[in-house]
Amino acid sequence: MKTEHYLGVACIVLASCGETHVSVPDAGTSELPSEGGDGGTPSGPRADSGPDERPEDDCMPEGVDNATPFSQTYRVVRRGQTNFQGTDYEIVSSMPWTYTLSAVQCHKSFPTTETDTHYIVDSNFELPSIKGVTDDVAWTPGAKNKGWAIGSNDDPAELVRKNGAMRPFVYHVNAGYEYGYFIYNKDPLPGDPIRYTGFRPTWVVHPDGDGYKMFFLDSMAPDSQGFEWPRHGDHWELNFGLYVDPNGKVYVPKPDKAKLANHDEGWDDYFGCVTINKANAPIPTTRTQFPGNESYYASETFLPGYAASGAPGHKYWGQKGRSMEEVAIWEDDGAPGGLNSPGNYHKPYSGGCDQAGYNFAHAEGFTWPELRAARTKMGDIPTRDQLYKITLYRFLGKEKKYELLGTLSYEQEDNGEWIPTGSGPEVHSLNDKNGRWIVNGPVFQDRGDHVFAILEDL
């Protein structure tokens, strides 16, 4: 059965979001240095002075907090509260409004056909917003990509024409979510030592007479629907994402058939590992997309004076004070000698908190000696204010005290290059030519332990 209607963008009345409070006693230890002040510059954290990017009230996503000093630029959702050294911190999830699909597509309407299993949205190749369906799908800004998680200068209409028929495009998701367009079946093809071919799409679309039919994966019998269910290809062919036909119509599965963004484990209400930004400006983080093109896409932004809980994905941290648009990029700038990736270079740290524990390290791109020397010679030298240090503490629940785990930081040499440094009892060298350091380990929730990653200015 098909019905015709027009699709309006998600318009939801602002509502409050449930929170969890994690109380950690104010227990001191001789290993813990004095914190002193708000952790920022003497003038305190910088206020949000950019343009107001918020959508109109009737397009505001559910649970957004518009009362923070950063709400003009960021979609801030409260997740709970934690305490570090006697100070309470709100735990929030933050991403720029320019990456919020319902905000970017606010008040846009597209002709839509509804079937029993999916929607067909005539959006002229754009990533559409559907209330209750794409709420946790993210818009990826760019020159030609129309919201899809492809290259900024990649035109989806041109890519469909090159394909000669309908093809899928990967999309990005909000921080804290996983992509719903694939599943790993643990059945890689023979001769695949990396096991990439175990990845299969959650849905596929095939021609059906004058139109198209959407099929959904039976993970127990993936090849039982009359055709061989596709896998991640030997040459990185991408069979994942939302399908777009030659006329620019986007095929979107209904939520009861497939999830576009997964959050099956739920939010971590124990908050075993949290990151607290005590620096003077927001710090954007990115994650790579797999299956996908493994470029950098938006993840959490750590806001000054706030905490953030762990988020999934392989994360890379940007320089302090840079916009997400400057950080979540991969495109090269044409620098000679193959050392032309500012997107790779502009990320000083990787890893972070997750529900299982913590894993913080200096990122390989920013510390790659040849790339670092080349970018420094070009004058691409971060300022001291753009960098920051990460100090980790563990609160021992049984002993009711904090212990220092270690600090990751940078020191600048006379020629301008920034060299990674590490110190502390739990910090160890990665033993590579980049001179990187790492601090990682589990969080024992059964003992009442918590880990705090404190971000501070150099």
Image: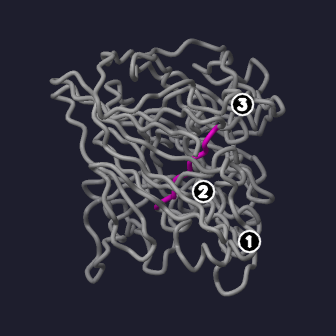
Q: Quadrant of residue 375?
A: bottom right
**Mark 1: secondary structure:** helix
Which element carries disc 2, helix, strand or loop?
Answer: strand
Could you classify mark 3 by the number of other residues whose Cα lies within 10 Å: few (under 14), some (14-19), or many (20 or more)?
Answer: some
Q: Are marks 2 and 1 in contact (CB under 8 Å)?
A: no
Q: Is residue 230 left or right of residue 127?
A: left
Above or below for 315 versus 197: above
Query: Magenta span: helix, strand or loop, mainly?
Result: strand
| Residue 73 horizontal/vertical position (percent) | 73, 32
Task: Give the distance between the C-alpha atoms of the residues marked 2 and 3, in whole angstroms.
Answer: 42 Å
Distance in Å between CA atoms under marks 3 and 1: 47 Å
Q: Residue at x 53, y 31 (%)?
A: 93
- Is residue 293 visible from the viewing direction of this image? no
Q: Find residue 161 and name its label.
A: 1
Residue 243: give its label: 2
The N terminus: image quadrant? top right
Q: Which residues are magenta?
A: 282-290
Residue 450 location (% of width, % of height): 29, 30
Tag 3 secondary structure: loop
Sooner in the amino-acid sequence: mark 3 or mark 1: 3
Going from the N terminus, do you reach mark 2 or mark 1 first? 1
Question: Which callout, 2 or 3, points at the residue further toward the start of the chain?
Answer: 3
Question: What amino acid type should be assigned to the residue bearing mark 1?
Answer: Arg
Residue 329 is inside the magenta segment: no
For the question of whether residue 121 can be seen, the reply is yes
Q: Position of residue 65 (x, y in %)?
A: 62, 18
* Residue shown at 48% from the left, 41% from the top: 261
3D distance between C-alphas at marks 2 and 1: 13 Å
CB under 8 Å between callouts 3 and 1?
no
Left or right of residue 383, residue 255 in this image: left
Instruction: Using the rendered view, name the quadrant where residue 120 is placed.
Output: top right
- Which residue reaches farthest bottom? 337
